[in-house]
Each structure stands twice: as C-alpha cells, then as structure tokens.
Amino acid sequence: MIVAEQKPLQEIKELIAETQKVLVVGCGTCVTVCFAGGEKEAGILATSLRMTSKLDGAPKEVTDLTVQRQCEWEYIDPIGEQVREVDVLVSLGCGIGVQALAERFPEAFVVPGLNTTFLGLPIEQGIWEERCAACGECILGLTGGICPIARCAKQLLNGPCGGSQNGVCEINPDTPCVWQLIYDKLKAQDRLHLMLEIQPPKDWSTSRDGGPRKITREDLRLVSEEAE
C-alpha cells in the first residue's frame, strides 16, 4: 500500500492562503488504511481549516468529500460540479491522486494535503514500514521474499556489508540487517545456495533512473476496443 502522512496544518494554510472556497478531497483506499486521508481525516481537516481561518480573522468556506480512489477517472469525474464551485482543492490522496485531480480538472487549483512517503506494510497497530521501492526488476524470488532494495540502507545485492553487526544495521540499532533476515529465511528453507550466486549490478533503467515509467497491456486495449 502507499503510505503517506498529513502535512502540518500551518503548511496547508499557507498553500490555500489566497483562496476563499476550499474543497478537501479524501481518498478511500491506501491513505484511509494508514489514517492519513480517508473520510474521517478529510472531515477533521476541513473542520480545522474552518476554525483556524475564523480565528485568524479571515474565515473560509471549507467543505469536504471523499471518493473511492483519486487515481482513477471514473471515481473523480462525478465531483466535477463541486470542483467548479471552489477556488482550491486540497487533495488528501497520494501524489498520484493530486496529479490525477490536476490533470482531470485542468482549470482547478490543486494542492497536496499529504506527504507521500513509501510503499509499505502495517506491521502492527500504528506502525508502517517500507517494503518495496518499485524498482521494476523484482528479485524477491532469490532473497526469500525479503527486499534488499527497499530494506537495505545501501541497496546491496550481495550482502551483508561490513557494517552489519550481530544482525543489526549500522544506521540504527533498531533496524535489523536485511541480509541477516535473508540468510535466516533461506537457511530455514534449505536454499542458502542462492546466496552463493553473485548478482550482477542492477539495471536501474527499470527504476526512476529511466524516467517516468508506463506499462501497456495490448491484450486489455484490444478488449476495450472490441467492447466499444
């Protein structure tokens, strides 16, 4: 899931300082799960903006709504009328949601209410950890289902490094060495031979280093064209 956290209220206030009518748009998927931008959070932020703007002596008209997903046209198209009635949209979606709103409604002023952080996993109540870097060349089949790209501070493909001591990463005593985790997992599965295979330098062209990425499924495009 995409993990995000809400921007400080003061930062959001500065982003919308020159506007009067504000629409806070929540998202009902990833950011709802991490309690950053769902229906409840959208309502709380809208209330906070109304209250603080009034206390500042310049009350704003702030409303809120939540769509199922901000990253798909079919879910944001229905709010077009509400968008046209306000001066600014505060998106409580991830960075993709912000850009989707801005692209779908090119005349609208759209600002982010969240900071998108990483692709993560809720390991326990109130704690999320990064698990995937979306590098475009997955090697989890060779590492026991544990990602060294996202979870190793040095993104080593042939670890561990010399900074690993007693199964702990040198960057933080609370951070386990991912290559120790990989070793333990492969040993338990009797697959340690995989660690003896030297991995070549990673092809980073599949990651962000190759520019904006796009996936095209021609089979799905054909189905869509036939349906039309």
Image (tube, rainbow, N blue to C red):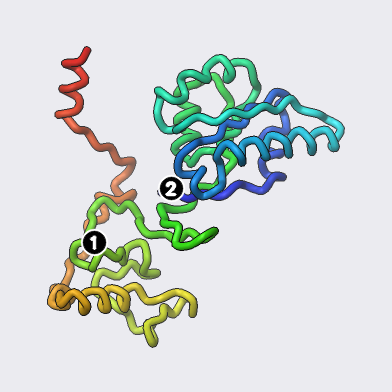
Label 1 residue SS: loop
Which residue, given by chain and number where applicable, does mark 1 sit on?
A: 140
Left or right for 92, reference 11: left
Report if residue 196 is visible in the image. Answer: no
| Residue type (three-letter) at the residue carrying disc 2 | Ile
Which residue is located at x 34 percent, y 84 percent?
A: 162
Q: Secondary structure at mark 2?
A: strand
Q: Residues within 10 Å of mark 2 (few under 14, many from 20)?
A: some
Query: Which residue corresponds to mark 2?
Result: 2
Q: Quadrant of residue 157?
A: bottom left
Quadrant for the C terminus in the image: top left
Cβ atoms under marks 1 and 2 closer than 8 Å: no
Image coords of residue 31 (percent x, y): 50, 44
Kindly tell me whether residue 160 is visible in this rendering: yes
Q: Position of residue 100 (x, y in %)?
A: 45, 30
Q: Amino acid at mark 1?
A: Leu
Tell me what residue is drawn at x 61 percent, y 39 percent. Answer: 40
Question: Circle 1: is it few (<14), some (14-19), or many (20+) Cα within 10 Å?
Answer: few
Q: As drawn, is 118 to the left or to the right of 40? A: left
Q: Is 44 in front, or is 104?
A: 44
Give above or below for 46 relative to 35.
above
The answer to which of marks 1 and 2 sits earlier in the sequence is: 2
* Residue 52 coordinates in the image, percent (x, y): 79, 38
Residue at position x 55%, y 48% in the image: 35
